[in-house]
Amino acid sequence: MLDIPDEPIDWRAKGFWSPSGGGPARGSSIFDGGFTWPLLTIRESAVRANIATMAAYAARHGLDFAPHAKTTMAPRLLDLQLEAGAWGLTVATPNQALVLRRLGVPRVLIANEVLEPAALRWLATEVAAGWAVWFQVDSVAGVTAAAEAASAAGGHLRVLVELGHAGGRTGVRDLGEMEAVARAVSASPALSLSGVTGYEGQLSDEPSVDAFLDQLAAGVRRLGEAGLLPPTPMVSAGGSAWFDRVTARLAGAGLGQLILRSGASVTHDDGFYREKTPFNRVPAEGPLTAAMEMWAQIISVPEPGLALAGLGKRDAPFDEGLPIVLEPATGLTVTKLNDHHCYLRVAPDMPVRPGDLIRFGLSHPCTAFDKWRDIPLVDDERRLVDVLHTYL
């Protein structure tokens, strides 16, 4: 069990109507007056089903699972993932790693480069205190920064050399660079190279994903033959769009400990990941269910064919697609968001009035959670089960 702080609900909590503090009681309906609109909710049954599905998938294929915590940074959900058997958790920044350390997460992958001296020194002291944490390197400069910080702290750091691809984000671009970075790590007594990592999620088609993963496997073999890796190296990959290809190309290849990092699976969505989930290609392995719902009122019907809902960019993600209307099932289409307004195209035969409550589905959980500090976790009747506090 994680050490989850007890956070109060009061007037600062968006979506909770709590002028006098205290917040709504567990078991109360979101429609009983203890909440206001817009409101993001997470359905507990869908979250638990998704966590169980991914845990079973990892176990079935002999993978260790370290889901990306940056998707939610909600301790209650992270705790559920660890309880279901997650090997560890992944983060993107030292600040997120600090949160997980304070929560008591035993193993953390920082799936990013870290070059800031204060953060590196802190990591070295935490490793010396017994914490299992790793981060990525993709340059000799990054290796030098890590080695200097670890030495200054009188500690040691564990790293993974990262492979990238042309036009992608971080990571060395070829295996020659990979070996050069690995040799720089090996030359420092303050560092140890634990393995190799990569991220295939920005690639757009299966052949390019497979080619990248094959190159990652070749890099592991090359570094192993050069004596630069431990006997059982860590090999980490896997966003939420191509983890089936990670399994197909890397699992069972005898490369070492394969760690999957898919994070958006915990809530899934009604947009980007609904279209991109690997379970569309391998349906017998899934499915995942959208757990996020956004509730908002129609606040104006100023002209025929147009309605405005009280929901905007401050509330809902829009970087990977606009929200969609789930209820009513037909007749309303989202066309645009302002900061606090959602434009809806209204079908000619669709009756809509100010005050109507609309249920929306969202696309991209990562940028949904970062707009909400406190989120109701609800049952299937939309009764409050718990409050998710986010640390983003």
Image: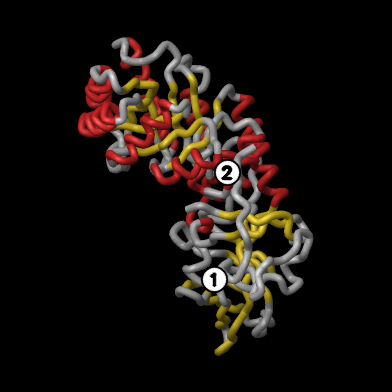
Residue lying farthest to the bottom in this orientation: 303
User: Looking at the image, which residue is at 33% across and 30% down?
Assistant: 163
Residue position marked by numbered label 2 in the rendering: 265
Q: Which mark is residue 334?
A: 1
Q: Circle 2 sits in a helix, a strand or a loop, which is it?
A: helix
Q: Please state the horizontal and vertical placement of residue 21, each as a whole percent of the image.
A: 65, 69
User: Looking at the image, which residue is at 63% across and 25% down?
Assistant: 60
User: Looking at the image, which residue is at 69% across and 43% down?
Assistant: 48
Give the side of residue 304 with respect to residue 152, left or right: right
Judging from the image, the colouring scheme is: secondary structure
Give the side of residue 284 with respect to residue 111, left or right: right
Quarter in which the N terminus is drawn:
top right
Q: Circle 1 sits in a helix, a strand or a loop, which is it?
A: strand
Q: Is residue 364 above or below residue 54?
A: below
| Chain-order first, disc 1 or disc 2 | 2
* Amino acid type of the residue tagged 2 in the rendering: Ser
Foreground mark, 1 or 2, reads 2
Sort mark 2 into few (<14), some (14-19) or many (20+) by Cα contacts within 10 Å: many
Marks 1 and 2, how far apart in space? 25 Å
User: Looking at the image, which residue is at 31% across and 42% down?
Assistant: 169
Front-most of residues 296 and 117: 117
Q: Is residue 376 visible?
A: yes
Determine which quarter of the picture holds residue 208: top left
Determine which quarter of the picture holds residue 34: bottom right
Give the side of residue 366 with respect to residue 282, left or right: left
Whether pointer 1 and pointer 2 mark residues with C-beta atoms closer than 8 Å, the reply is no
Q: Is residue 130 above or below residue 331?
A: above
Q: Is residue 210 visible?
A: no
Front-most of residues 119 and 199: 119
Front-most of residues 152 and 284: 152
